[in-house]
Image (cartoon, helix red, strand yellow):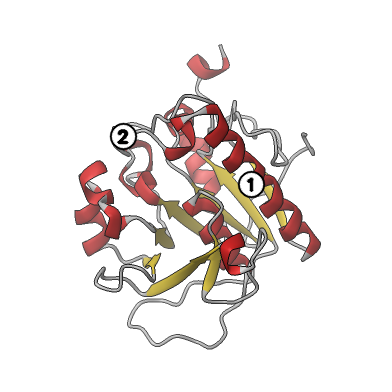
Amino acid sequence: MRIGRIRIDRDVAAIVCAGPSLDLLTPQAWSDLAHAGAIVSVNGAAAADACRDLPFTILAAMDICLGLYQRVPALESIWTSTAAWRVTSADGPHVEAESYLREVDEEHGVHGWSDDPDEGYRGGSTGMIIGNWMANRWASTPQSAKPIPPRGFRRLAYLGLDMQPNDGRHAAGAGLHSSGFARSREQHQRVADAWGLFCREGKSRGVEIVNLTPGSGLTTMPRVEVPAGWLSRSAVA
């Protein structure tokens, strides 16, 4: 389902996943993205060659405690040296970060969205967890030497959310492993359904969630047209 266009401005949280479509985007796309109110890296996106100069506000990686550094070797040095706010799983309290989120889903009585400011709906994707968290407001202002990132966004725009069935590749530099949704058609459908539920629950709370990923295989999420000038000539051809 396409719903026209979206303007990237301070009211938008741009959430950058690590799909191979990142390699198709032009310098204009990254320049336009810098106008977002927050720019969020999901897992290996911060290590992607295409994103090395992107001024990320937040780095979100739930699976560092599960060996993500081994799958994305460049991520560890980026994570330990970044000026961005780091968000990881509460299951990995030994991981250096500014925020630790509880990952919740139907097993915890949470269906598509958590309204707790310290939680995020798991659904099979770090992108969902951090999107949920970005749309909720801070319960209290955290204490940190780093700039406190804005939250409470009513508009979330996703890039690099390719979700092609049986194709779990990542952008160059973002890891050589395969994403979990690509393990089987059934797993892809489960994650796709979770994205649909996440979007519906967000909408019921006044949060607009859209997919800006060119050629995305995710049909359960509202898509908008990729702005003119964002795709390389080879991608358009």
Tell me the kind of residue under disc 1: Trp
Earlier in the chain: of badge 1 and badge 2, it is 2
Contact, mark 1 vs mark 2 (Cβ under 8 Å): no
Residue bearing the label numbered 2? 177
Q: Which residue is mark 1?
A: 195
Q: Is residue 212 visible?
A: no
- Depth order, front residue of 159/89: 89
Question: Which quarter of the rendering shows the C terminus?
Answer: top right
- Give the residue drawn at x 52%, y 18%: 235
Q: Choose between 65 and 51: the one closer to the eye.
A: 65
Residue 33 to residue 229: above or below = below
Q: Amino acid at mark 2?
A: His
Left or right of 179: which side holds 15? right
Horizontally, residue 115 falls left or right of residue 5, namely left
Q: Left or right: where does residue 183 sit relative to residue 122?
A: left
At 70% across and 51% down in the image, what residue appears? 197
